[in-house]
Image: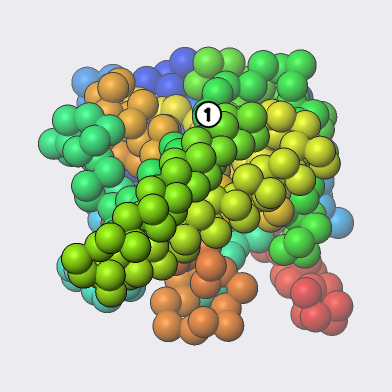
Amino acid sequence: MTTQKTYTVGQITPAELDALSARHPQGGFQQTSHMATLAQRGGITIDCVGVRNAAGTIVAGCMIAFTKGRFGLEGSIWLGPLCDEDDAELLAAMTRAITICARKHHAVSVSCWPGQVYMRRTTDGEPDGPADDAAIENMTRLGWRHAGFDRGYGSIVNRWVYLKDLTGIKDGDALLKTYLKNTRRNVKIARNSGVTVRRLGRDELDVFHDICEMSAEKQHFANRDLAYFQRFYDSFGDDAQFMLAEVHLDEYLATWQGKFDAATKEVERLEGTLPTAKYPDSVRKKIANARRDLDAATARVADATERIGKYGEVVPVAVGLFVWHPRELVYFSSGSNGDFAKFYAPTALQHEMMSECIRRGVTLYNFYGISGLFDDPDDEGHGVLEFKQGFDGFVEELVGEFTLPVSRVRFALMRLAHKILKR
């Protein structure tokens, strides 16, 4: 262990990292022993370092993942380090711990994406508090190079995230009332359309992967392979929930068949009263309304019948990977079948998992990444933003990516190579 002022820096155990992550205001699943296990199963070398105060308590720490680059190992700290970047002295100790570890592994550099909030914003992206420029100044003063204030989806960690505070919400019904009107409606449509939500077992992860593949193809991004999801399941255990929303088309058909029968009877009843009606125009209006209900029910019965013939009575249509942490629940990965968009299964998934947060006493729901563009309807992430905004949360703009050169010669060569290759 090396002492610097009142702090001592050195390695910590994965269990010690978990304890820190659970109590730290920036704690998240990316900085846990589960994530370390997942990385190691993927062939990545990991190490955990921390900072202890004079009493021996760990007050900052992180997991560093070392991967092979062209000029040697490169370290990555995903949503870390767990450190108050506004505390210059503590940050200096944390940086020293990271540097010592990186040199031990002969790394070229270490990049980090702290969970430190640069600015809290409203659901529409408007500032809702001061900017934390001190954190960035403290980082750069210690040799960390800031990648800037970018927008768009990050290739490794998103700088913009959407969240919802569940504090004080008592149950699912109270939660529903906090959503915007259209999202409340969509939850109810899903309920009335035979959509149910359940947890997938490991032997069903192919279903999860296949539905994610549908979304990947439609939105032109690369899906992770099935083996990754299997490793994730094995690494996180009960803290990872692979959830499925499926449509019970037999129930959907029965519901609309009932509405068809009721509308048919109502049209017949009203038409029977028309010859003797005291106010025939009023009855005609009621008949017109009843016929519209009948036409809608006829179309839905036909739709349900056609879908059953094509897909069967129970169809998996949307999936989500949700990761539990003592501080929050993270909506990490998802996919859906666009042919069933009007059943609003993804909305049902969100509502169910937020309701589970309330049951467990977890007060923060993390919808994860958004692009950070709020007024561009042509942005590729606009639909995702609107979906998340429907649940009426808030935005955190994080401080972003920083890189610390460790081997300055190799780092300079690496930057030159990237410049030449324009990457």
Identify the residue at image location x=50%, y=54%: 294
> Which quarter of the picture shows residue 374?
bottom left
Which amino acid, mark 1?
Val
Who is closer to the viewer here, 410 or 255? Answer: 255
Say above or below: 222 vs 187.
Answer: below
Residue 226 in the image, given as x and y percentages of width and height: 81, 33
The residue that mark 1 highlights is: 197
Who is closer to the viewer here, 163 or 12? Answer: 163
Identify the residue at image location x=71%, y=29%: 313
Quadrant of image for the C terminus: bottom right
> Which quarter of the picture shows residue 191?
top left
Q: Is residue 296 visible?
A: yes
Who is closer to the viewer here, 396 or 262? Answer: 262
Identify the residue at image location x=25%, y=40%: 175
Quadrant of image for the N terminus: top left
Give the residue at the far left of this rendering: 168
Say above or below: 378 vs 323.
Answer: below
Q: Is residue 112 visible?
A: no
Identify the residue at image location x=86%, y=78%: 421
Residue 213 in the image, given as x and y percentages of width and height: 78, 47
Local secondary structure at mark 1: strand
Number of callouts in the render? 1
Colour style of the rendered protein structure: rainbow
- Quick check: 225 left or right of 331? right
Say above or below: 323 vs 204.
Answer: below
Give the residue at the far front of this rendering: 276
Say above or below: 164 vs 417.
Answer: above
Residue 359 in the image, given as x and y percentages of width and height: 28, 22
- Mark 1 Cα within 10 Å, few/some/many (few <14, many 20+)? many
Residue 19 in the image, given as x and y percentages of width and height: 37, 20
